[in-house]
Image: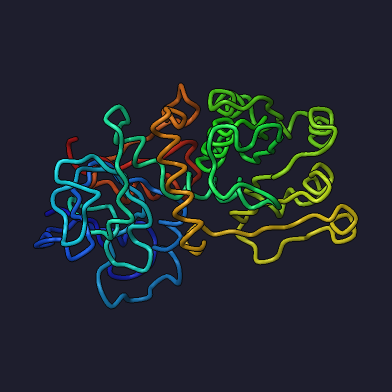
């Protein structure tokens, strides 16, 4: 079977297309999936590029997310069946087999049924972005453990970077759960994407006073804030968050330290919640997967430019170009076509 591997860390050039033996059969508790579409996230290229020049003990297949069709199931797997359409999450987390290959065997827990009316492109766009967004939207004090329609009714959420993949999923999930959503963007083009995703209000922080506008839209403050760039936004966040509110941080600007305004945070009893979807608890991950699957079934997480998330496609042999596109800040979602659906 065809697969993309790298044997040492470094730039995108370390990725190579190889022929390798397919998995013979899934093990107990596993499902063997024929991957149709693989999704690329920032974490994929960052893992590949970390500590450049480090030799790996075994070849690594990149990419955490994907979608495809179940080929076979191992002993003890009753919830999946051959021929079933599915989406995948955390495929390469602490494993050498990601989704940039034609076949992958995964624990059945990481293989989720995909409705017949949901495309493989949608399935491959879930994973890291949607599960991260779910955790960010459920980490405030008194939050529901699992989002559902009405779970955030009466709440106003601020999503920083509303045109990014996580921001897009956060807008859609928050709206599905009944929240009012304010999204921040850096251009008219990105504003159009955030509106297409479903944001009730969009604030271009380069064209208007962000704090004044958010305060106008949400006089009592926003809670939670889904934050992509705390290094740039911490001072503004603490001025617009509701008293006792939560600022959920899921990314950084490549810096180790965040300048948190201590006194203003204390005065408003603000919670700064850092999160990484890989290391959430098993219960939190299961709740996120179940909620995302329910939102997909409800048609609440569409992708594509009309839905606010443009898709950029590459064939498997151009996986290096796909990684470069994400590394260079491609707007929307970058996907790799592994096989025909």
Q: In the drawing, does residue 225 fall left or right of residue 331?
A: right
x, y percentage for residue 86? 27, 43
Viewed as shown, does residue 7 lie left or right of 154? left
Residue at 87 percent of width and 52 percent of height:
268
The residue nearer to you, when weighing 115 against 104, is 115
The answer to whether 50 appears left or right of 266 in the picture is: left
Q: Residue at 84% x, 47% y: name it.
A: 243
Q: Residue at x 50, y 40 (%)?
A: 165
Name the residue nearer the viewer: 253 or 131.
131
Which of the 4 quarters of the picture holds residue 124? top left
Residue 118: % across, % down: 32, 30
Q: Residue at x 60, y 59 (%)?
A: 254
Residue 145 spot, x, y in % from top left:
57, 50
- Of residues 253 and 162, the one nearer the viewer is 162
Residue 239 occupies quadrant? top right
Please state the total of marks drawn on the protein image: 0
Q: How is the image coloured?
A: rainbow
x and y percentages locating residue 148 in the rendered image: 53, 37
Quadrant that contains the N terminus: bottom left
Compared to residue 193, the image places residue 84 above or below, namely below
In this picture, residue 117 sits left or right of residue 338: right
The quadrant of the rendering that contains the C terminus is top left
């Amino acid at each position: 079977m065809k697969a993309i591997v790298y044997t040492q860390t470094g730039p995108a050039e370390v990725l190579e297309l190889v022929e390798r033996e397919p998995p013979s059969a899934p093990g107990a508790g596993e499902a063997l999936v024929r991957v149709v579409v693989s999704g690329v996230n920032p974490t994929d290229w960052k893992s590949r590029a970390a500590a450049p020049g480090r030799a790996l003990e075994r070849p690594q297949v990149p990419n955490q997310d994907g979608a495809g069709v179940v080929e076979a199931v191992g002993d003890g797997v009753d919830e999946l069946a051959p021929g079933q359409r599915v989406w995948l999450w955390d495929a390469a987390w602490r494993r050498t087999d990601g989704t940039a290959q034609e076949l992958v065997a995964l624990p059945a827990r990481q293989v989720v049924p995909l409705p017949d009316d949901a495309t493989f492109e949608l399935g491959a766009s879930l994973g890291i972005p949607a599960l991260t967004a779910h955790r960010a939207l459920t980490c405030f004090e008194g939050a529901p453990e699992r989002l559902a329609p009405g779970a955030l009714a009466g709440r106003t959420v601020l999503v920083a970077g509303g045109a990014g993949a996580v921001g897009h999923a956060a807008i859609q999930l928050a709206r599905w759960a009944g929240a009012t959503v304010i999204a921040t963007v850096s251009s008219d083009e990105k504003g159009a994407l955030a509106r297409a995703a479903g944001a009730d209000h969009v604030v271009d922080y380069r064209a208007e006073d962000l704090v004044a506008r958010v305060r106008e839209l949400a006089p009592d403050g926003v809670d939670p804030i889904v934050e992509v760039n705390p290094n740039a936004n911490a001072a503004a966040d603490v001025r617009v968050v509701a008293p006792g509110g939560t600022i959920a941080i899921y990314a950084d600007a490549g810096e180790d330290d965040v300048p948190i305004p201590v006194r203003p945070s204390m005065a408003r009893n603000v919670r700064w919640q850092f999160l990484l979807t890989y290391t959430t608890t098993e219960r939190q991950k299961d709740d996120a997967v179940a909620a995302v699957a329910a939102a997909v079934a409800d048609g609440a997480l569409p992708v594509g430019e009309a839905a606010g998330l443009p898709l950029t496609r590459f064939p498997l042999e151009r996986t290096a170009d796909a990684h470069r596109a994400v590394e260079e800040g491609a707007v929307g979602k970058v996907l790799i076509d592994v096989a025909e659906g």
